[in-house]
Image (tube, rainbow, N blue to C red):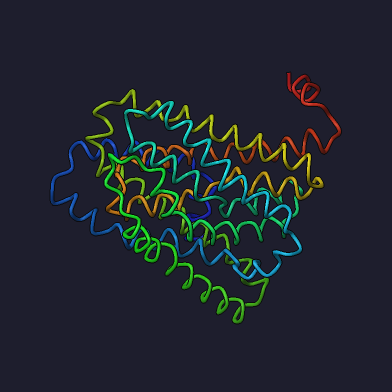
Amino acid sequence: MLRNFLTAVKENLIYVVVASLVAGLAFGQVAGTGTRSLLKAAVLPVLFLMIYPMMINIDLKEVINLRRHAKPVGLSLIVNFAVAPLVAVGLARTFFAGNPAYAVGLYFIALIPTSGMTAAWTGLADGDLEAALVAMAVNLLAAVAILPAYLSVLVPASVAFDPTALYRQLAQVVVLPMVAGNLTRRVLLRQYGSDGFTRLKPMFGGLSSVGVMLIVFIAMTMRSQSILADPVASASTIVPLVVFYAVILVVGAGLGQTLLDTERGVSLVYATSMRNLSIALAIVVAAGSVPAEAILPIALAYILQPPLGAAYMHYRRDVVGEGLTLREAVADLV
């Protein structure tokens, strides 16, 4: 029964996040000081519930295969840490000039690339799964190392941002769960073998999804008053997110088509268009030096990212795989 519940939460994460977002905003309008204190105390345990199971599913040993996949991984690093930040800065200046907190949320989305779904979508779209796994490990380690330095440059002066404090938060909410998850992975593989571990993996993803559900609810409850003070401006944050994902998808697909074979091109698309929203969410909620309102763009990105992954997968499998042009595929649907 627990497995079915966790699977259902993971498979319906878009709806779960939307429900948690709405419920948190509504509950925040009536929650008292005592309730808010309890929710604040629950933040770190819930963050661990969200990040630790996800880290069990990430195999950091894939870094040793870097040389074999140097080209797609190198391109993913260029897109994720050169192109994506520039796109985010342009969008932040255009859409969030009067709200630096939302700009910070967009920067976190841009600077923490790849997620567990990078590998899943790559496999479903018949891409190079090993290249995707190597890109995931390398990009995650790179993000942990350089995130505070990037943010110290990008975050507006009006925001009291402390890079040193962010390094401490990264250690708490990313590095420690990463180490614990890697050790747990080794123990489980030794005890149950590869097949047994594969059967357990969906449960870890489900536990992480439950953590996402809870942390979105807590964060929205805590910041409900400020977010709903200007609901139109808050809702409009979805627009730059759509533009950001569209630009990164086009850049990744273009580079893959031009410089890589088909399978590695697919892995490049998913290593750049998928962002690690769980880690971004965890850092923003835990870090006292980051504006709490930065949570909203990240929560809304949960609504956009899965459909994007699915749409490109169907394009690769049902359009390109069938030898159709996009116009022919649309005509068939009509």
Q: Position of residue 223 (x, y in %)?
A: 26, 41
Q: Residue at x 59, y 51 (%)?
A: 117
Q: Position of residue 130 (x, y in %)?
A: 72, 60
Q: Which residue sits furthest left?
A: 33
Seen in the picture, residue 1 relative to 151 is either above or below; the reply is below
Q: Which residue sits furthest right?
A: 323
Seen in the picture, residue 190 relative to 281 is either above or below; the reply is below
Q: Position of residue 147 (x, y in %)?
A: 45, 54
Q: Residue at x 43, y 54 (%)?
A: 149
Q: Is residue 105 left or right of residue 37?
A: right
Q: Quadrant of residue 230?
A: top left
Q: Nearer the viewer, residue 132 or 214?
A: 132
Q: Nearer the viewer, residue 315 or 14?
A: 315
Q: Residue at x 68, y 55 (%)?
A: 73
Q: Nearer the viewer, residue 68 or 330?
A: 68
Q: Nearer the viewer, residue 14 or 277?
A: 277
